[in-house]
Image (cartoon, helix red, strand yellow):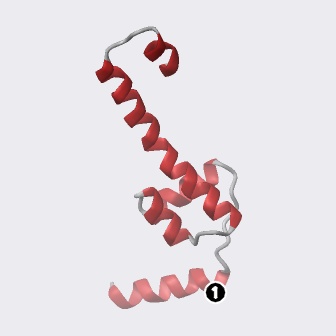
């Protein structure tokens, strides 16, 4: 849709806006792919996407990417949370 509008001579601001919106989704998708391939941890994928870890986990689930978090990691996270809360 965006390419057709840009090709048909729409205003430059529209094409830039479209590119910005499109790019906004590319980075989280790259983070999902890196996590799926094992190239990034959950924290690194979240940082790459510029999103909180919880939101990144939701996006991963929406794309059908299984979590690689082990039970021990989860329990350690709960322990760390209890120390600071």
Q: Residue at x 34, y 21 (%)?
A: 14
Q: Residue at x 55, y 69 (%)?
A: 42
Residue 7 to residue 41: above or below: above
Pick out the residue farthest to the top.
Answer: 8
Pick out the residue farthest to the left.
Answer: 13
The quadrant the C terminus occupies is bottom left
In the foreground, 30 or 51: 30
- Residue 28 drawn at (x, y percent): 51, 51
Label 1 residue SS: helix
Categorize mark 1 by other alpha carbons within 10 Å: few (<14), some (14-19), many (20+): few
On screen, residue 13 versus residue 25, left or right, reads left
In the foreground, 68 or 26: 26
- Residue 50 drawn at (x, y percent): 40, 58
- Residue 51 drawn at (x, y percent): 42, 58
On screen, residue 56 versus residue 70, left or right, reads left
On screen, residue 61 versus residue 17, left or right, reads right
Q: Please tell me in which quadrant of the rendered image residue 67 appears.
A: bottom right
Q: Residue at x 50, y 70 (%)?
A: 44
Q: Looking at the image, how many numbered discs can be counted on the residues?
A: 1
Q: Residue at x 41, y 32 (%)?
A: 19
Residue 9 to residue 66: above or below: above
In the foreground, 73 or 28: 28
On screen, residue 10 versus residue 43, left or right, reads left
Residue 54 to residue 80: above or below: above
Q: Which residue is mark 1?
A: 72
Q: Please tell me in which quadrant of the rendered image residue 8 appears.
A: top left
In the foreground, 12 or 40: 12
């Amino acid at each position: 849709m965006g390419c057709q509008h840009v090709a048909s001579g729409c205003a430059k601001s529209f094409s830039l806006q479209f590119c910005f919106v499109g790019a906004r989704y590319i980075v989280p998708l790259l983070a999902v792919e890196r996590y799926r391939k094992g190239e990034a941890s959950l924290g690194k994928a979240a940082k790459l996407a510029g999103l909180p870890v919880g939101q990144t986990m939701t996006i991963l689930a929406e794309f059908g990417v299984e979590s690689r978090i082990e039970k021990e990691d989860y329990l350690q996270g709960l322990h760390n949370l209890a120390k600071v809360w």
